[in-house]
Image (spheres, grey):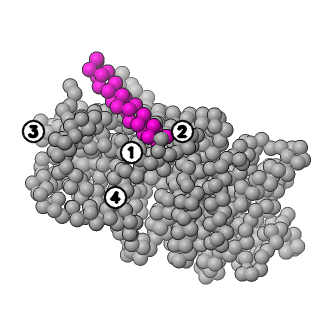
Amino acid sequence: MQRQVNAVDFWRGYALIAIFINHIPQNVYEHFTHKNISLSDSAELFVFLAGWSLRHVVGPPEDPRPTGDLLYRLFGRAITLYVAQMAIALLAIAMLAAAALLLVNPLFLEWHNAAAIFYDPVRAHIGLVLMSHQLGYFNILPLYVVLLMIAPSVAIIHRYAPSLLLPLSVAIYLVSLVFGLTVPTWPVEGQWFFNPLCWQLIFVLGFSMSRERGPGGWAKRNIGWLRLVAAPIVVVLGIMSWFNLWWDPTIVPEPKLLFLIGKTFVTPIRLIQFLALIAVMSAAYPYIVQVLPNLVRFLSLLGRNSLPVFCVGSVLSLAGQIVRFAYGGGLLVDTLLVGSGIAVLSLVAWLSEWRSRKD
Amino acid sequence: MRISVLVACCLAYLGAMTAAIAQQQQPPEQPPSGGAPSTLQRLCSEAAEVGFGQVQLPHAAKALRDRKRLRVLAMGATPLTLRDQTLGHYALVVKMIENTVKGVDVEIIDRGVSGELARDGAGRIKTEVALVYPDLVFWQVGVADALALTPANELKETLTRTVRWLRAHNVDVVLIGLRYQRALAGNEAFQRIRKAIRDVVREEGILRIGHYESIEALDRARRQQDEPPSESDLTDVGSNCLADFLSRTLAVGLFAKPGNAQDKKSLGVGGEGGAMQGPWAPDKAPDKQK
């Protein structure tokens, strides 16, 4: 049965639209997403809400899902996501190849980390399957796959030792920051753009905050004054983001990653800003429902069908980049691209629900 | 049904991992017999005749003098190296530099993100400089901006600001600009980005890998000889020769003396830091080598 409109689906729908727009760089509308006035962006929101949604699988404390069923569902979901990642990566590679041929532009073959696929295919295809080779802008799902692979551990620790879950996650995060631990890429030298050792904390925080007990219950009980603390953080860091008023990263003390700003390691200042943003914006949802009910219904529709919408959005954003290069950017082209893209995403979400109803 | 899919996926994953490990353990490819330079090596040397600057890398040179150690941060898309698939691109560059300048230790830390615009890379460079403490930055820039239609003045401003920030933090920079593509020789967006990079290089007095001009000259020369290389040949040369160009340019920058512009034919000449014994050295600097 279709879920009622709710804040989680609404914000997830918003994150999907923002990711789609941000993944067409230099388009006019990327200046209107919240990344311009925020340290964190939609990636944090997407991962946090993924963690939040884990509660639906785990079940309520009084009626938890049997452990075997839980593991089966979570691993099954991880495999679904893995297959989705393979499919969209393959589509992206074909699109880049087609663009190179049709537009007589070999640069497309080197774009977004695709060069290895075309010029070093033996190793690159192995890397693709292992997810150690990721295309640019197609690197969130691999993180999500890893997070769902660890989700059974998260759920089991939460079930049998709930007070250990968040400290353990924070410990892994801090160790990664202090020692600069990361996951390497292969065959192209480098590291995962989204370091799973750090991003797991956002996922676990999303799950913990969704619960009525523990840190989630505490946050819900104290949300009033939490918002009072969070608002100035959001405003000050928003101004600093807008005017690019950051301190010199070379002067911060060791361990530097604790004091730097970075997306790969989702460093503490970025994490704090994100949590502050969540606290503040959670107050906005009831008002948005009253003022813009159609928008809420629309974004919730997208949010309820996040996997197909995300996959199609990823492919469409790459198509948008290619079209922009072919026809030039500007208000008209960008409006057509973003407008038609959002229309297709809504159609995908609607079809997904229509198919579920038919089944 | 679901179980079988799951098992199949796991087996496929394990198979792929095994293949990857096995591939990594293969012995290195052997060079062509007889020690004669391959066609590709000849093309690299031929292309390298053109397009290298003669700008100093003072901070990198100082690091070599004082510590016998050079730490390089690589940003932008990681270039491909097809010639020696047992080594990654930068590992090959390290090998070449260490062969060229004896007794030094070179470390290249690759923090490149392919497809990243210069504006995003510029922000990350500062963070990575704080983490890595490099003496030198290799920054491959331009392709993503050309394809995203970044305004040339915006790119120029970003590069200028970042180059100045790096210099203020005692870090040298070598820009790796666009590569020559015959099909794009007349593409306005591509050429605007190329010009913006060249302008920054000229105005800020920094080193740039002139592989565009090198490959373009090679293409022109070969066509005059009625031996026009195909577009894919040019791509191969561009990919395979970049490590050569990079180590060669670095050698020039490390040993260039202020106010003493070197003849480009003397790129293989030894400097203050050690004897040059690079793969091109016998052809390029026979007198000094003797």
What are the residue bounds of the magenta stretch? A333-359
| Residue A304 part of the magenta segment | no
Callout 3 environment at 10 Å: few (<14), some (14 to 19), or many (20+)? few
Q: Which residue is mark 3?
A: A62
Whether labels 1 and 2 belong to a single chain: the reply is yes
Image coordinates of residue A315 in percent, x first then y, are: 46, 36
The answer as to whether the residues below labels 1 and 4 share one chain is: yes
Of badges 3 and 4, nearer the viewer stands 4
Sequence-earlier tag: 2 or 3:
3
Is tag 1's residue or tag 4's residue first in the polypeptide sequence? 1
Q: Residues within 10 Å of mark 2 (few under 14, many from 20)?
A: some
Which circle, 2 or 3, is nearer the viewer?
A: 2
Residue A152 percent location from the top left of the image: 27, 41
Q: Are marks 3 and 4 on the same chain?
A: yes
Which residue is the site of mark 1?
A19
Question: Which residue, given by chain and number where applicable, does mark 4 sit on?
Answer: A37
Residue A50 location, quadrant: top left
In this rendered view, identify the residue nearer to me: A172 or B170: B170
**Magenta stretch, overall SS:** helix
Q: CA distance from mark 3 to mark 4?
A: 41 Å
Q: Which mark is residue A323?
A: 2
